[in-house]
Image (cartoon, grey):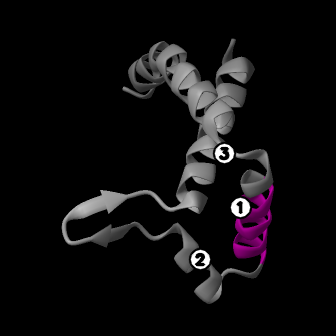
Amino acid sequence: MLIKKHKHAVAGLAETKEAYLALENSLDTTKTRVWKRQEQKAMKERGELLRIFEVKADKGNAFCTSTQSIMLIHNTKLQLKLKSAWL
């Protein structure tokens, strides 16, 4: 079962990588540096700082916070590293 899930995840990495690169290239580098620092601080200090990862919604229209975008990038990078380790 785990091998099947892994193969499925590896197969989806091509799409994930393309989306990641598009997202990363569309973001302002100044803002991403700030968001990455916020992410690092939240992961280090935890507690209330972890609220930056919560999804926010405005009258039914969900949107990602900037930090959530960074987390998407971070998770995609991690997936790419895991893929490389398995190959």
The residue closer to the viewer here, 7 or 71, is: 71
* Residue carrying label 2: 50
Which quarter of the rendered picture does the C terminus lie within?
A: top right
Residue 74 disc label: 3
* Residue carrying label 1: 35
Q: Are marks 3 and 1 in contact (CB under 8 Å)?
A: no
Residue 6 lies left or right of residue 63; in this view the side is right
Q: Which residues are magenta?
A: 33-44
The kind of residue on which mark 2 rests is: Leu
Q: Are marks 3 and 2 in contact (CB under 8 Å)?
A: no
Q: Secondary structure at mark 3?
A: helix
Residue 33 in picture, x, y percent from top left = 80, 55
The residue closer to the viewer here, 77 or 63, is: 63
Q: Quadrant of residue 1?
A: top left
Instruction: Name the residue located 52 percent from the left edge and 18 percent from the top edge.
Output: 10
The residue closer to the viewer here, 23 or 39, is: 23
Instruction: State whether residue 40 is above or below residue 29.
Output: below
The numbered mark, 3 or 1, whose residue comes first in the sequence reads: 1
Cα distance, mark 3 to mark 1? 11 Å
Residue 53 lies left or right of residue 64; in this view the side is right
Mark 3 closeness class: few <14, some 14–19, many ≥20 residues within 10 Å: some
Residue 48 in picture, x, y percent from top left = 59, 88
Cα distance, mark 2 to mark 1? 13 Å
* Residue 51 in magenta stretch: no
